[in-house]
Image (tube, helix red, strand yellow):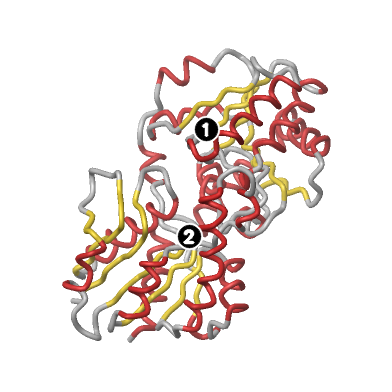
Amino acid sequence: MSRVAIFTPHVTTGAAVSSDALGMQKVLEAHGHDARLYAESWDLERARIWSVNEINGFLTTTDDILIYHHSIGWGPGLELLLNLQCRKVIKYHNITPGQFFANISPWHEEKCHDGRQQVRAIAAAHCDLYLADSDYNRQELLTAGVDPSQSFVVPPFHQIDELHDIEADLKTLDAYRDGQTVIVCVGRIAPHKGQLDLIEAFAAYHHDYNRESRLLLVGREQAAFESYSMQLRGRLKFFYLDDAVVFIGEVPDAALKACYLLGNAFVFAGEHEGFCLPLVEAMAMKVPIVAYEAAAIPETVGDAGILLDERDPYLMAESINSVVSEEAVNVALGMLGRNRYEQNFTHRHIENKFLQALGNLD
């Protein structure tokens, strides 16, 4: 049995990095390891999380393992990574370029800039193993100087299997099951998630193709991005969409499932994603996808959705209409998505890839 410390700055609900860290812990414990999750801060009560200040007392031999989730600039984390005397594994989730947050959140702009700079230091540390959510992320590691023989793609752990098994929230279903076409997008409200472009594309669809349509934006809003949220609401007024776009906010899993069940299409206009877990959720729930090609999105979706290589709101609107109005297209994309999920992103598949990658430590 090995002692394994899984290490991330913050653990919270509804966050892909947190889900991945928790999933790793669960798998490692199931295979007999003493695996603990360490963080600087957390707001999750249902799991035991240890303070990062206690990590030195746990990792005491060179055979112990540290798994460091790199997702934002974190000086204390990097210092610990460099100084601990144990086997070291990096899980790279990619980091949004800081310019997306310029004039919106100076803190995020700085931390993302620092995080991307720290990739080079992490590569130069010659850790024992480098894992990446996607090949897109792996290529960034290789560019930073990581040895290809030490790097492997392992998609992030998630809770989609649990989402599939629970009952959908009836209140949410009743609120929006009124005969209107429902376009759904899941993801926190943030500049790189492309909600400004999404609203413009939905406006074209709503006004030119289908007045009986509604866009559900599911995801938390943060005080740090208040000015961006205000831009979005200003865009709604400009396009006369006040009654057609609903900010659902962050919701429990039962309500999230209801939103997916309501969705006639999942539409995503993000500009930078290292993986994009909501796309996998949509595929698992058989909701057909329309998205712009950007970063790792084509790799995640594969042939299970309509991907647009041009950021054109009218082209996206036309694609949404095709998916919604043509039943054969809708059903075919939904089935392709479910098949892609089952072949690439189930918990069992990710567990196997994770354990195979860790086998390279021996």
In the image, what residue type sits under mark 1?
Val
Q: Which mark is residue 72?
A: 2
Q: Where is residue 38 shown, x and y percent of the image? A: 27, 61
Image quadrant in which you'd find residue 282: top right
Give the alpha-carbon distance from disc 2 to disc 1, as whole Å: 23 Å
Can you tell which mark lies on residue 11? none
User: On the picture, is 28 further left or further right than 250?
Assistant: left
Q: Which mark is residue 218?
A: 1
Residue at image position (47%, 62%) is: 73
Seen at 47% across and 20% down, the residue is 173
Sequence-first tag of 2 and 1 = 2
Residue 177 screen position, x and y as percent: 54, 17
Q: What element carries label 1?
A: strand
- Residue 108 % position (x, y): 53, 51
Front-lying residue, 323 or 206: 206
Residue 63 percent across, percent down from the top left = 24, 84
88 w.r.t. 174: above or below: below
Q: Is residue 143 left or right of residue 346?
A: right
The residue at 65%/56% (across/down) is 302
Q: In terms of secondary structure, where does tag 2 sit?
A: loop
